[in-house]
Image (cartoon, rainbow, N blue to C red):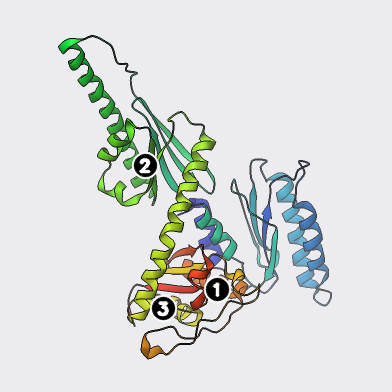
């Protein structure tokens, strides 16, 4: 799950029907170049200006795009924060629509799409690349709980205990004192885990990571509740005083590693469901029909569709006999349009969207498939 703002925007855009005027979807890399200057200004001015001028026979469309260009440039000049590394803008003034979001996560390249509806695939991809998750950073005296989303800190809480030290008191006094210290350490970590559990429940966070040292980690794992264990993505060794940026980088790396490791399992699950005639479909046409019927629980989509066979197509599945339980041929589709269509319907029908990072895993079925809620 990404940030609430991004998720809500995806839902609003997915509900937009075909527009009568040109609909602009603009994705911008807002990182400064090596000279400290914006990378996107020339792209916006040149590309949008040329697109507006192309409507020589449609004055209303040209006026709509020109108005959008002015509003986009004003937003970029007055609203875009220096700390933001990416921005996405969706505009169609002829239809009264202007939506903009800025994020700390980087958008790799400037992209401009114009059509009759929003281009959502890159936005959904951003949602998946920078998931929303909680991280507990804890030692025996101090704990921080972060909620990260779209590459930035969304929330942070601290759990502080009274400082304790080991004393060389000797004999039974030392043993009793040490047991007291150990109990205090465990109580502190239990408080931290309880606080994590409350945040995860209140914020509806789907993924959790815990970090600590050789002393704290065994206690943390002992204290985890079953709901936290079910959400646990990884356990890391990390200094409790690590800078916020280091915590973000280490935990995001772990989240991506966890996702990559689970991709093969997800595709295996999908293919087994499809081959057995169960709750699985593959290929664009069958997946779209299942989405339109509200059957899809989880849309499984290649994160690199355009890498399979150029920008405008995807590799067809191998032609095998259906009665042998193998794969059927999958017709080529235009990835830019068709991926958008699947993403929009998935958002409209509350289907989860899972991106598979390795394009080869779904190449034989056209890069798309779905796990179903029920069979027809």
The x, y position of residue 268, in whole percent, is 38, 70
Residues at marks 3 and 2 touching, judged by CB atoms closer than 8 Å = no
User: How many C-alpha atoms fall within 10 Å of the one at disc 2: few (<14), some, or many (≥20)?
Assistant: some
Vertical arrangement, residue 322 with respect to residue 50, above or below: below
Which residue position holds label 2? 199
Which mark, by number, is residue 341?
1
Name the image quarter holding residue 79.
Answer: top right
Q: Position of residue 279 (x, y in %)?
A: 34, 76
Q: Is 28 left or right of 263, judged from the image as shown?
A: right
Q: In 3D space, how far apart are the residues under numbered discs 2 and 1 (Cα atoms)?
A: 35 Å
In the image, farthest residue toward the top: 169
* Residue 55 x %, y %: 80, 73
Secondary structure at numbered mark 3: strand
- State the image coordinates of residue 98 (x, y, percent, origin top left): 65, 59
Q: Can you say which quadrant of the picture contains the C terminus?
A: bottom left
Which is more foreground, mark 3 or mark 2? 3
Q: Which residue is drawn at 57% across and 72% down?
A: 17
Q: Do labels 3 and 1 touch, CB within 8 Å?
A: no
User: Foreground: 128 or 305?
Assistant: 305
Q: From the viewer's perspective, is 107 left or right of 248?
A: right
Along the line of sight, the residue nearer the viewer: 244 or 173: 173
**Residue in the foreground of this view, choosing between 185 and 336:** 185
Q: Is residue 275 above or below residue 111?
A: below
CA–CA distance in space, label 3 to label 1: 17 Å
Closer to the chain start, of discs 3 and 2, is 2
Residue drawn at x 46%, y 86% is 328
Secondary structure at badge 1 equals helix
Residue 281, label in figure: 3
């Amino acid at each position: 799950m990404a940030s609430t703002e991004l998720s809500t925007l995806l839902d609003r855009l997915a509900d937009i029907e075909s527009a009568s005027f040109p609909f602009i979807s603009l994705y911008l890399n807002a990182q400064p170049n090596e000279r400290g200057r914006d990378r996107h200004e020339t792209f916006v001015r040149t590309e949008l200006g040329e697109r507006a001028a192309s409507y020589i026979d449609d004055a209303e469309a040209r006026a709509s795009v020109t108005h959008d260009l002015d509003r986009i440039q004003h937003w970029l000049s007055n609203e875009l924060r220096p700390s933001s590394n990416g921005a996405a803008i969706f505009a169609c003034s002829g239809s009264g629509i202007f939506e903009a979001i800025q994020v700390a996560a980087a958008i790799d390249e400037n992209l401009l799409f114009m059509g009759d509806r929003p281009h959502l695939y890159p936005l959904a991809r951003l949602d998946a690349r920078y998931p929303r998750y909680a991280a507990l950073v804890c030692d025996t005296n101090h704990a921080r709980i972060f909620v990260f989303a779209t590459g930035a800190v969304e929330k942070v809480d601290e759990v502080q205990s009274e400082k304790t030290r080991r004393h060389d008191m000797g004999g039974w006094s030392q043993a009793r004192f040490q047991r007291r210290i150990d109990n205090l350490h465990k109580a502190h970590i239990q408080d931290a885990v309880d606080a994590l559990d409350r945040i995860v429940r209140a914020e509806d966070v789907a993924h959790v990571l815990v970090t600590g040292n050789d002393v704290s980690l065994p206690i943390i794992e002992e204290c985890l509740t079953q709901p936290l264990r079910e959400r646990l993505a990884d356990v890391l060794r990390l200094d409790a005083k690590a800078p916020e940026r280091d915590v973000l980088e280490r935990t995001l790396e772990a989240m991506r590693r966890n996702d990559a490791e689970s991709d093969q399992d997800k595709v295996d699950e999908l293919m087994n469901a499809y081959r057995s005639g169960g709750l699985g479909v593959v290929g664009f046409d069958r997946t779209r029909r299942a989405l339109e019927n509200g059957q899809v629980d989880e849309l499984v989509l290649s994160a690199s569709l355009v890498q399979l066979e150029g920008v405008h197509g995807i590799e067809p599945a191998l032609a095998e006999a259906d009665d042998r339980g193998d794969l059927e041929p999958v017709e080529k589709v235009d990835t830019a349009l068709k991926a958008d269509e699947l993403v929009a319907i998935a958002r409209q029908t509350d289907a989860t969207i899972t991106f598979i990072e390795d394009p080869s895993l779904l190449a034989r079925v056209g890069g798309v498939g779905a796990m179903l809620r029920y069979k027809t």
